[in-house]
Image: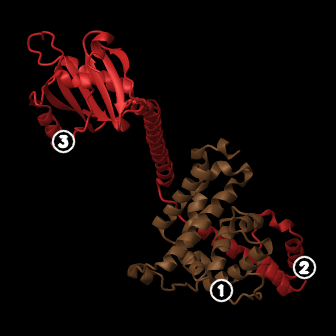
């Protein structure tokens, strides 16, 4: 190893480190012990290394940096926790809505079933209603309903045609119109009543579970006996107080 | 696992050397603080992935160096020139002995080195890192580290003292 080669190797030598154990550095150091010129160079070099190293270590670390890092991290963790809490809350809300949708949508889907329709219409008849048109002229009623885009091309059973018609109203079902035609059975009406026999006509497509065929189905809905049948594209619901025999007289 | 490393203990143990390394590279207090802060922030997020607890120091210095390089790339893409700072950057290299220099002048000399020499030389003089650790931190082979150190140190001494240290031929940069 020449002196210049030793200098090159010793350029990386940091006094006081384990690197003196490196075979190349150890060889160069050994050479310096026998080479006075190299020894002088090495001494100066080591002094320089120490001095330069000291300069690097003199770089003053700003006061409060450690505290700043720790507090910033604490704040960051707090933000992360809050963000996670918000995400958790959002997820919980979404799950809640999802659960509600699962339970609610089937209910909604069943809102248009025949039994619900029957209950709702019978409820209208029993709870009181206001007739939009009071007349005993069937043609006026049809005209009025047609003008209001409510079902007007209904077909009345022969017996019902003979019942006394007193007027009509327009009710709602699934955002569509239901024609309510009011009749009198001939019995004495209670005070304040104008009608005791009601026919509801709606587009049959709007009532799921409605049946095919013209034969009426009888069922007791609330306090009324009802007959339900379809004809053409319409679903008919006739209701009155009494029993099946009573209502059969009008079919 | 690195989970077992207490964050405050870790900060207390390494924020100083990390800051000195960052300052050696940037010579800007705010930038250096940001780099150290960002390094610990990354540790808080990803440190748990480190399996070998003995590599914490290397991991921290590596992360800081990467963040520095990343920031420098951004600055290169979107250069920001501060005129006051640029004036301060004009070479002020004292020909007197190193003992007469202050840290700022040494760092100014360091800044005159090519970018590839600055980080290894700073790590070398901070003396907290072995050659192997420097190689790990900079993600370069050990031979390359030694080569860069040899050239970087020689050039630094030359700048500080005016001496013409023999410059080895470049290899493996």
Q: Is residue A150 left or right of residue A6?
A: left
Q: Residue at x 46, y 65 (%)?
A: B30
Q: Are tags 2 and 1 found on a single chain? A: no
Q: Is residue B128 left or right of residue A78?
A: right
Chain containing the residue with disc 1:
B
Element on which disc 1 rests: helix
Asked if residue A44 can be seen in this view, the reply is no
The circle drawn on residue B158 is 1
The circle drawn on residue A34 is 2
Quickly name the residue at label 3.
Answer: A146
Q: Is residue A97 left or right of residue B110?
A: left
Q: Are tags 3 and 1 found on a single chain? A: no
Chain containing the residue with disc 2:
A
Dividing the picture into quadrants, the one containing residue A227 is top left
For the residues labelled 2 and 1, the Cα–Cα distance comes to 26 Å
Q: Residue at x 88, y 71 (%)?
A: A26
Which tint is chain A?
Answer: red
Q: Residue at x 67, y 58 (%)?
A: B59
């Amino acid at each position: 190893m020449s002196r210049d080669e030793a200098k090159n190797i010793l350029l990386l030598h940091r006094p006081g480190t384990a690197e003196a154990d490196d075979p190349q550095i150890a060889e160069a150091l050994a050479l310096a012990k026998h080479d006075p010129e190299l020894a002088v160079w090495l001494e100066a070099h080591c002094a320089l290394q120490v001095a330069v190293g000291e300069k690097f270590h003199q770089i003053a670390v700003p006061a409060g940096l450690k505290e700043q890092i720790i507090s910033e991290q604490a704040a960051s963790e707090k933000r992360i926790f809050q963000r996670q809490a918000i995400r958790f809350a959002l997820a919980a809300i979404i799950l809640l809505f999802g659960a509600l949708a699962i339970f609610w949508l089937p209910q909604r889907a069943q809102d248009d079933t025949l039994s619900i329709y029957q209950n709702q219409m019978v409820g209208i008849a029993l709870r009181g209603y206001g007739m939009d048109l009071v007349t005993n002229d069937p043609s006026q009623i049809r005209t009025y309903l047609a003008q209001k885009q409510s079902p007007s091309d209904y077909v009345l059973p022969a017996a019902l045609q003979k019942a006394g018609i007193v007027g009509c109203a327009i009710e709602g079902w699934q955002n569509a119109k239901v024609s309510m035609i009011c009749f009198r059975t001939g019995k004495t009406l209670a005070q304040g009543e104008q009608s005791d026999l009601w026919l509801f006509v709606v587009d049959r497509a709007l009532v799921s579970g409605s049946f095919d065929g013209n034969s009426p189905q009888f069922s007791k809905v609330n306090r009324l006996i009802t007959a339900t049948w379809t004809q053409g594209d319409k679903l008919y619901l006739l209701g009155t107080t009494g029993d099946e025999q009573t209502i059969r007289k009008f079919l | 696992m690195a989970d077992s490393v207490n964050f405050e203990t870790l900060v207390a143990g390494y924020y100083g050397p990390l800051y000195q390394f960052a300052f050696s590279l940037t010579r800007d207090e705010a930038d250096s603080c940001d780099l150290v802060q960002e390094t610990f922030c990354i540790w808080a997020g990803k440190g748990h992935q480190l399996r070998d607890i003995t590599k914490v120091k290397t991991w921290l210095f590596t992360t800081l160096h990467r963040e520095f390089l990343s920031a420098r790339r951004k600055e290169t893409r979107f250069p920001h020139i501060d005129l006051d700072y640029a004036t301060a950057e004009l070479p002020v290299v004292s020909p007197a002995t190193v003992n007469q220099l202050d840290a700022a002048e040494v760092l100014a000399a360091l800044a005159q080195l090519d970018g590839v020499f600055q980080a290894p030389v700073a790590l070398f003089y901070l003396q907290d890192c072995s050659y192997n650790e420097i190689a790990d931190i900079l993600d370069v082979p050990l031979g390359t580290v030694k080569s860069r150190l040899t050239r970087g140190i020689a050039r630094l001494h030359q700048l500080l003292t005016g001496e013409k240290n023999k410059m080895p031929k470049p290899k493996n940069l």
